[in-house]
Image (spheres, rainbow, N blue to C red):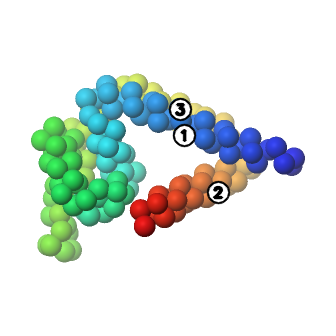
Amino acid sequence: MTTLEPDLMAATLQRFGLERDRMRAAVASDAGISATDLDALEHLEADGPLTQRQLGDRLSLTSGAVTMLVDRLEDAGWVRRRPHPSDRRYVLVELSAQAIERTPARLAAYHARIRAIADKVPAAHRDAVRSFLQAAAEAASDAAANMRR
């Protein structure tokens, strides 16, 4: 491996991030929601129901701001609140059935295309690709946490 290859991988990952951000801005605009609203929906899609505090931490929002965000998304039919199953002090926020049905066709097509691309990665390389992407995600998470301090 030459010294250029890691730089090229990092640059390619950055380009993917920029293009994904551009695609996400288009999705948010198409759905009539803000980028932060879309971020919330993506966290709920990826991780399932979250408390408002967990959602606020992931979005770097104050408790008041996350309450307003969840109110807005609930009023628009994107999410619903339900009691926490084991701790009645908390409420969980989850995607509504309507939100799942309202997935824009172009976003569903993008997800299908990503799955098709992933299917083409040779089985022998999948662990390495997954490991690289997980490490990159952890680096981004750590950087975000360090910036909030």
Nearer-the-camera pick, 70 or 94:
70
Q: What amino acid is found at the position of numbered circle 1 in the picture? A: Gly
Question: As drawn, is 20 to the left or to the right of 64?
Answer: right
Of the image marks 3 and 2, the number of the one nearer the N terminus: 3
What residue is at 58 percent from the left and 37 percent from the top? 16
Q: What element carries label 3?
A: helix
- Mark 1 or 2: in front is 1
Q: What amino acid is found at the position of numbered circle 3 in the picture? A: Glu
The quadrant in which residue 127 appears is bottom right
Q: Name the residue under label 2.
A: 131
Q: What element carries label 1?
A: helix
The C terminus sits in image quarter:
bottom left
Given contact means CB atoms under 8 Å apart, are the residues at marks 3 and 1 in contact? yes
Q: How far apart are marks 1 and 2 (CA)?
A: 17 Å
Q: Name the residue under label 3.
A: 19
Q: How far apart are marks 3 and 2 (CA)?
A: 22 Å
What residue is at 54 percent from the left and 40 percent from the top? 17
User: Residue 17, labelled with which disc?
Assistant: 1
